[in-house]
Image: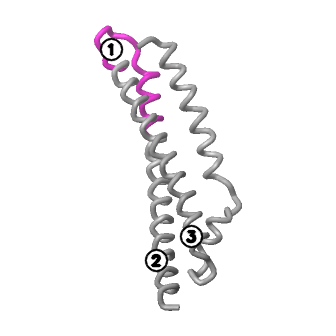
Amino acid sequence: MGDDSSRSIINALKNEWSLFWDAFQKEEKSESEELLTEKPEVMSLDQAREIAKALSEDRKKINQKLESLSKEIELNSAKLEGLRLVGGSEDDTIKRIEELNDLGQVMAVSLAKLDLKLRTLREQENALKEDLATS
């Protein structure tokens, strides 16, 4: 694979990461986060389902970004192996692989936090269902 295709993948990933990072670094609480902190009695079942759907979509996007990141790490690892075989300079490639690994760790932490929110929401949703069933 040529350097041009690697650069285009890298640029696309950088753009995606930038959008991802901006979305997760907002200072203000989103409506779904505020609802998640409320008691189940405050949230309707429809609201819980809507929030769960949004969180599931976010989870899907993060997983897709992790897959892209993994592919880029594989490409850079193959490039590194080639550089080692021909005795080329490895510094930039090693640095990029380390950056990608750090990025992957940040994304994994974000995914874990999102999973926790989703689990909490599912518990609240189940409590709402039980309340409706006993009413």
Q: Earlier in the sequence, mark 1 or mark 2?
A: 1
Measure how far apart labels 3 and 2 are at the Cα level: 10 Å
Say if the magenta span includes residue 94: yes
Q: Which residues are magenta?
A: 80-101
Q: Residue at x 60, y 45 (%)?
A: 21
The single residue placed furthest to the top in the displayed view is 86
Q: Residue at x 48, y 13 (%)?
A: 3
Q: Is residue 75 above or below residue 82?
A: below
Are circles 3 and 1 on residues that touch, CB within 8 Å?
Answer: no
Describe the element under mark 1 as helix, strand or loop. helix
Q: Choose mark 3 or mark 1, whichever is in front.
A: 3
Q: Secondary structure at mark 3?
A: helix
- The quarter of the image holding the N terminus is top left
Corner quadrant of residue 50: bottom right
Q: Which residue is mark 3?
A: 48
Can you identify the residue that label 1 sits on? 82
According to the picture, the residue beneath numbered tag 2 turns out to be: 126
| Residue 52 sits above or below residue 16 on the image | below
**Nearer to the camera, 94 or 120:** 120
Number of other residues with Cα within 10 Å of mark 1, as a class: few under 14, some 14 to 19, many 20 or more: few
Give the x, y percent position of residue 116: 46, 65
Residue 123 in picture, x, y percent from top left: 46, 75
**Distance from label 1 to label 2 (Cα)?**
54 Å
Q: Is residue 4 left or right of residue 85?
A: right
Report the predominant secondary structure element of the magenta stretch. Answer: helix
Q: Residue furthest right?
A: 28
